[in-house]
Image (tube, helix red, strand yellow):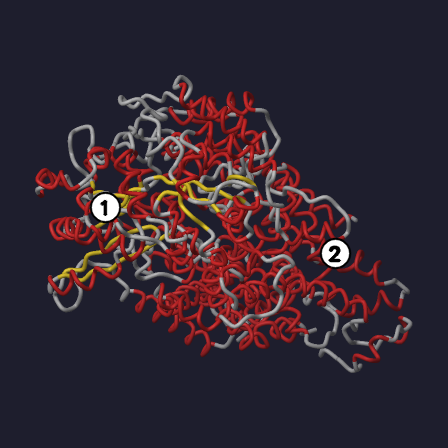
Amino acid sequence: MSAAKLRLLVGVLAVGVLTAGCGGSSGSSGDGRVTLTLNLFGNMGFKDLYAKYEAAHPNIKIVERTSAYNDHHRNLAAHLATGSGAADVEGIDTGFIAQFRAQPERFVDLRKHGADGLKDRWLPWKWQASVAKNGAQIGYGTDVGGLAMCYRRDLFEKAGLPTERDEVSKLWPDWASYFEAGRKYTANKPEGASFFDGGAQIFNAMIGQAETGYYDSSDHVVVATNPVVRSAYDEVLKAVADGESAKLVGSSPAWNTGFAKSQFATIACPAWMLAKIQDQAKAFAGKWDIAAIPGGGGNWGGSYLTVPAQSKHAKEAVDLITWLTAPEQQIEVFKAHGILPSTVATYEKPEVKNLKNAFFNDAPVGQVFTTAALNLKPQYQGPRAGDIQTAIRDAINRVEEGKQDGPQAWEQMLKDVERIEQ
Amino acid sequence: MTTIITEAPRQARVPRSRAARPRGGRRSAGFWTYAALVAVLLGSLFPVYWSLIVASHDNDAIARVPPVLTPGGHLFENIARVFDTTAFGKAMLNSFIVSGSVTVSVVLFSTLAGFAFAKLRFRGRTSLLVVAIATTTVPHQLGIIPLYILMAELGWTGRLEAVIVPGLVTAFGVFFMTQYLSSAVPDELLEAGRIDGCSTLRLFWHVVVPAARPAAAVLGLFTFMQAWNDFFWPLVVLTPENPTVQVALSSLASGYTTDYALVLTGTVLATVPVVAVFAALGRQIIGGIMSGAIKG
Amino acid sequence: MTLARSGPRRRWAYQLDVKGSPYFYIAPFFLLFGAVGMFPLLYTAYVSLTNWNLLEPTRHWVGLANYAELLTDDYFWNALFNTVSIWLLSTVPQLLAALFIAHMLNRSLRARTFFRMGVLLPNVTSIVAVTIIFAQLFGRDFGMVNWALDLVGLDPVDWQAGTLSSHIAISLIVIWRWTGYNALIYLAAMQTIPEHLYEAATLDGAGQFTQFRKITIPMLRPTIIFTAVVSTIGGFQIIAEPLLFQAGTGNPTGGSDRQFQTVGLYLYEQGFSLYKFGYASAIAWTLCLIIVVMALVNYSITRRIRRS
């Protein structure tokens, strides 16, 4: 390396450091407008709405950032703990809301911005789930994942099961009859297509319907003592033993592949799952359909919008989330993306109630999901519910993989849950 | 000494007795060498090739049986989608700035320190080297929170300094250069220079730097790639608004659904510039290994 | 300029140069490293003595309690076993293959730049892509590997479910990514071996393999030590591959029965999933200690190369 080259390189280095200085993330843009940043995960369907808001508020510029589900929540926890780096608006999933609700001092208390007057917008339990112990309201609900059961008409037909959605819904008023239908299906099943995707996903849906899940209302873990948990666990494993499960782990690459490969005939589907099915199973448009969930009601997923206390534009950010979660905007989101609002007032609107989805054989998705959301019995979510869910999922997988039997996996799971509780 | 490639490949396949090997030349590669290298190359290339294949199809190509092995017609559509979904152009530029700065700095400072550790005598040499190496044993991931606190104090979060500055030196580089220079620079040469009255700095420029070129090229290459592919720290400290390529890739994979065609198109796009840099500089960088090192 | 011409002042300058300048050369490294490297390190050491939980505002001094807990933690020992297993399965074949590939690349080759670039390509590809691809290749139902096994009449393997099978699959990812990298390190060092050594050996009638064993390997000693130590450090810290091998499922448990959870992944689970930062810091420092010991063991083993 010659001296001249070295000088050049040092020059490049200096330029690198200097230009790097340009990429700031400060709160205001050059033209004096306030920039509001939103950190979200996945597609929440707001993108089309920003232009409208900016047009009505010329002093506001909106920037949305998305990252992957787990990255997003992990980063949010770190940014809150270190007191910097969080956006003006942070999305939080139902699986994490209890964890963040436990640190209300890190969020803007929306009651100070008129939240109490808006309370009636939402399903009561949705509102309650983001209320902290000290009474602070830390977030406004966006979507809910009211449950239904998606199924493949063509596979049902081949297995000699009814195909019309009303008849299918009648086939399984409760989970016992769902698994019974699964046994019938499995006896005549088309090659390679199991009845459901994976034991853990079905278990998840079953628990989503219970009034009490993993926690009692005073934040005590009740996994070991809640009979609902054990009976759902046993029922699912019985169905697995009967060969009803495709033994796929939710959200894994293999599970995604399973849609395109027709590896299962039914899947518990919250509203947001529809987009996923449409993406992964393009070739099967019109062959999917939607029936009622066994047991009726139930919830899986859904999100909140919050404003971290460290935001420099808390007032503007609160205004924005108030607007985004208002019924008018939520209707747009539902129409464009099928993401079901938690603002109950929208459920009566014809454009919501009468919405159909062609991919799912024109299933009346509006009616199915609003009914599911209205029927569900709200369940109290404790702070580590997500980790407990994972521990149970692993237990069911151990059985599906043939490594342990049900009671062994259960024992090990209880030990895992104890560690999580500490 | 120069390399001599006199044989045509056809001749190279003919087995020859050892005595027939040209003197003073590097041993030529025979048929089996080529065969083995081609096999290694195919193994290296296949997954990369396959991501290009998936990138040129739509999402369901990834799971077909038997596997799809020929390109489809969706590549440009997918590329357009990548640029629509994230700030990919800015991410590329950022990644070049970060990786370039880090590479220059690591190579320069590692060569300096490596020279001192390998060839100079000073008090505390061994213990300082051990300290340097020992620091590489600390799992990188856990430094993240304290480092983040530090960056927040400096007001660098969301800015490229936060990614560049912690990467400016690596103990790996120092260790690498120390080990390399200890065998690549003959002590006699340095002794001779000293007797001629050369200062240490002149020895560095005129003896060490030329000898270090092959290793510097390799270290530079590795550093560039690692900085380019660094994922965990940029994800925490940067924002999708001012991202590096890897951060942009992670936001591509962020939907409730995973669009493999989209993600793999992104990774192909992210790989192309690095490959292009190497293809352009490769002759110089890797050629440097050849010519620079062999000086009798 | 010679020593003979220099007066006392020059001699003083010379002394200063010889004694002092080494510190000048290592200063940039230590200064920069002290600023951005040492602080996180020491901070982690301090945190490991507290019960800091990222979700809670307060933290307390707990002394060595985290370390005591770790020693009786089954999951830690399980993770350590997995780490050692994956490290052995990946490092040994990787370094041997790299040595062999470097040896081949060191011959006079046509298109040598092409070959050298080619073997390095796996290292350029993003870890995100690598995971997606390998997860697909090792898929249980539609993976290309099982498809190939089926073609030759073998039963499919559930790669993720088994302990050994998952370790093999993860090791293959590591080997695929890092063999070319190590080969180039060896190659750079091979270039410094004086050609006349080989010529003399050839004249003495030493064959290819003997030359490789008696000349190449001993001359590469510092580099082999280097790669062995670096692979040990890297191998014990492995986290991305096992984390992403379980892609999409979210939590870093390393399989349903933690069958491929490494220590790095366990640290990650405790620190970034359960937010037990004090405990995670204790894992980090314990892992650090293990790595230092393993690196020293490796160092002393590879040092013996000279004697062979």
Secondary structure beneath dot 1 equals strand
CA separation, marks 1 and 2? Answer: 62 Å
Q: Residue at x 37, y 65 (%)?
A: B91
Q: Residue C130 vs residue C111: left or right?
A: left
Image: C193 above or below A234: below
Instruction: Please state the chain letter of the residue tagged with numbered disc 1 in the rendered image.
Output: A
Q: Quadrant of the N terminus of chain B?
A: bottom right
For label 1, count other residues whose C-alpha is less than 10 Å away and answer few (under 14), some (14-19) or many (20+). many
Q: Is residue B127 visible?
A: no
Residue B7 location in percent, x, y?
Answer: 80, 81
Residue at the spot of label 2:
C217
Q: What's the residue type where badge 2 is placed?
A: Ile
Q: Residue C182 vs residue A78: left or right?
A: right
Q: Quadrant of the C terminus of chain B?
A: bottom right
Secondary structure beneath dot 2 equals helix
Image: A51 above or below A395: below
Q: Mark 1 or mark 2: which is in front? A: 1
Q: What's the residue type where badge 1 is placed?
A: Leu
Residue B181 location in percent, x, y?
Answer: 60, 61
Residue at the spot of label 1:
A305
| Occupied quadrant, residue A30 | bottom left
For label 2, count other residues whose C-alpha is less than 10 Å away and answer few (under 14), some (14-19) or many (20+). some
Residue C189 - label: none
Outermost residue toward the top in this view: A225
